[in-house]
Image (tube, helix red, strand yellow):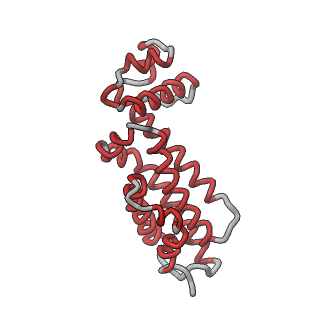
Amino acid sequence: MIKNNSRTVQTLIDVARNLFAKKGKDHVTVNDIAEESGKGRRTLYMYFKNKDEIYKAVINTELDRIIKRLREVEALDVPPDVKLMRHIISHLDAVKDAVDRNGSLRADFFMDIYEVERARRKVDKEEHELIRKILVQGVEHKVFKRLDPNLSATIILYTIKGLEVPYIRQNINDEFQRNKIGIIDFVLTGIKRQ
């Protein structure tokens, strides 16, 4: 895809996302996207090679929304343990919101998890750095035990990611929703000072 933040590109991505959400990726054509957006196929092909490239742009747009929410948490002026707790909650809620917002794309998300994971590598790298910074702050402020911030950030990131699928699929019951803070406290118990 050509890097372009024009309204046309954003319109095409938004229209494609809505169509993918309603019909599923396999049931949407480039013609559908062009027609629904009010743009010609020629315009669409100026920015995207094919439907798969549009789909990747939709995924990247959703991932950008997630990382934006996590950056907002990182900017908060709160103690490191509270910031990490909010980071974990924001991550899970942002991923669930992205999947819920995309309707039948939900099925594509689980069927095409490798494509999503490929797209997530850059976001995961940035999120790892956000978590690492929170851990360093926590050690400096004596909120967290002395720890290896890189290794600990990796463990926390993969722990959060491990909760995503059951959280999205609602295999975690309503009690989990009510007790999110307690579960996150459990995750933090190993790194907090007593």
> Where's residue 47, x and y in %?
45, 23
Q: Would you say 131 lies left or right of 31 here?
A: right
Residue shown at 53%/82% (left/top)?
A: 146
Q: Residue furthest right?
A: 77
Judged from this view, the residue extending furthest toward the front is 174
Instruction: Please state the total of marks drawn on the protein image.
Output: 0
Spot occupied by residue 35 in the image (x, y as percentages of width and height)? 45, 15
Task: Indicate left or right for 194 with 53 as reference.
Answer: right
- Residue 65, located in which quarter of the rendered image? top right
Q: Is residue 105 above or below residue 68?
A: above
Q: Quadrant of the N terminus?
A: top left
| Residue depicted at x 62% and y 77% | 140
Judge from the rendering whether residue 155 lies leftward or rightward of residue 131; answer left or right. Answer: left
* Location of the C terminus (image quadrant): bottom right
Residue 183 higher or lower than 54, as above or below: below
The answer to which quarter of the image holds residue 137 is: bottom right
At horizontal 52% and vertical 68% (from top left) the residue drawn is: 179
Percent x, y for residue 46? 44, 18
Extreme residue toward the bottom, this view = 194
Q: Nearer the viewer, residue 38 or 46?
A: 38
- Which quadrant holds residue 157? bottom left
